[in-house]
Image (cartoon, grey):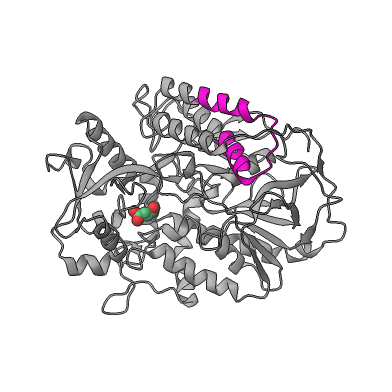
Amino acid sequence: MQEYMIEGYLKTDRYLVNFNTEDLPSEFFDVVIIGSGIAGVYTALSCPRNTRVLIITKESIEINNSVLAQGGIAVSLDQNDSTDLHFKDTLYAGAGLCDDTAVKALVTEAAENIANLCLYGVNFDRDSHRRLSLTREGAHSINRIIHTGDATGKEVCDTLVSAVSCLDNVVIKEQTFAIDILTEKGECKGVLTTNEEGTELVAYYAPVVVCASGGYGRLYSKTTNPEVATGDGASMAYRAGAELMDLEFVQFHPTVLCHPENQSFLISEAVRGEGAVLRNHKGERFMEQYHPLKELAPRDVVSRAIFQEMQKNNISHVFLDITHKDKEFLENRFPTIYSKCLSYGIDMSKDYIPVAPSQHYSMGGIKTDEWANTNILGLYAVGEAACNGIHGANRLASNSLLEGLVFGRRIGKIVKENLDSIKIREGFKPKIKNDRKYIEKEIDCRSLIKRLQSVMNNNVGIIRTKESLNEAMETVMEISSLVEGVNASNVQMIELKNMLILSAQVIKAALTRKESRGAHYRSDYPDTDDINWLRNIVFRGEPNND
Ligand code: SIN
């Protein structure tokens, strides 16, 4: 992989709080997993039953981004489909930036993992022959998305969470916030955590730590992501010296409900897969002016087209029209979306749905190879927290839950193959401390977070320029200076510090990429530059007191 490496853009403390492992309450496991979305839970299920596994999650186990996934999971099952075609579609959507080896793993191991989900009891929709029903989403050249109505993520997560909850070898700790990855001589040794109030530090040591903490959607004020998606995983990995990659590629979902009372509810791409079309304020279709695949063009193309329509006509949203389908079909196929829209007085069998693009997915994250290894021994990353190159510059729809499955299972295989070394724990407790003197100061974190999210939304969104990005960087630096050296005594302050570190890298990456590619569009560099382009922009954190 050809890379453009930037050494630690925003200088940061190695650790966010004071501690000394000599005095800390601690527990030992074979594997510690940060995050309880599909990637984290499936990784736990994939580890051998004779390993002791801990899942920590900062909220309750069912609050994560995977649960909200509506559309489904991509898998080549149709008789006219193939893993090669899925591979080709993924690469096309990824705009030249995908990692072929990782994508190969994704598409070839898809079916076996779906079969595994069926064994766990996931109830996917089936046709009259009991075959898995397949629908279409943007940039797929064939029907390839398996689903459970419009709540696929919830069905998969509920099933996997109940499976993992029955396992004696897996411990789940909720309301447990991971502050920092513990490292000694550059090797990962465990995770430093705190409770909700930020008052009780505990260290969990393990030879294998898996970061499955999700993406960084909450850097933006308008997002489909839950509140927990503050990019903590990438930020703490960066402080530990991990590499972050492709951060400039932020996916905006084209069709998010735009109603005065709700601007974060997703209207699944599968609605367009079932024939919905986009219309502007005059009721005219416009996608044919932007891409031959029209409403089913890659997600970045559709989002940009809607954004341009909105700007051109000075309107806050466009409309999604699926009125050619009757109420019975819609209630059955999209029960969640149908009832949510109805609760706002929108009957999608008769009314157009007001929609606008909103942040949805982070392509960038902690750099890994195709076996989820980071550059830090013992630290793995999987799911949206990771960047292994499968999504390139723009993720193909419904490849994300699949990513969590395929690479989570691969981590399970690594654990199994290295059981002997993983099981050795003698002398494992490391001696690590952070005794930096912090300032005690009352800071209104909530308002600073809001300010940060708003500038990220307005200046680092669907269309960027050097000026917009520089302005955003100024805001990030100004807020950073307000919290520099201040004790991270509560979870909100830790989140704010994480968000600042990550925002700075996202902006720096977006400034560095002087071309438009996939989800990264610079109106001052509107063309894709296939000659002098930088492939992957990588940041490496510089721990200053490890
Ligand atoms: C959707 O249902 O449109 C979202 C699916 C995805 O993000 O892949």
Q: Which residues are magenta?
A: 473-502
* Image quadrant containing the N terminus: top right
In which quarter of the view is residue 130 placed? Answer: bottom left
| Rendered location of residue 279, percent (x, y) | 17, 44
Main SS of the magenta part reads helix
Residue at figure coordinates x 43%, y 21% from the top left: 466
Q: Which one is nearer the viewer's eye here, 363 or 470?
A: 470
Q: Which residue ends up furthest to the bottom in the rendered image?
A: 129
Is 486 magenta? The answer is yes
Q: Which one is nearer the viewer's eye here, 290 or 487?
A: 487
In which quarter of the view is residue 532 placed? Answer: top left
Q: Is residue 505 left or right of residue 271?
A: right
Count all numbered tags in the image, as a single digit.
0
Q: Is residue 10 left or right of residue 223?
A: right
Q: Is residue 11 left or right of residue 445?
A: right
| Rendered location of residue 190, percent (x, y) | 73, 53
| Rendered location of residue 329, percent (x, y) | 20, 68
* Picture quadrant of ligand 1: bottom left
Is 382 magenta? The answer is no
| Rendered location of residue 97, percent (x, y) | 45, 40
Taking the image as drawn, is residue 406 in sight? no
Q: Is residue 290 left or right of residue 223?
A: left
Q: Which one is nearer the viewer's eye here, 283 or 185?
A: 283
* Residue 512 sits above or below residue 374 on the image: above
* Image quadrant containing the C terminus: top right
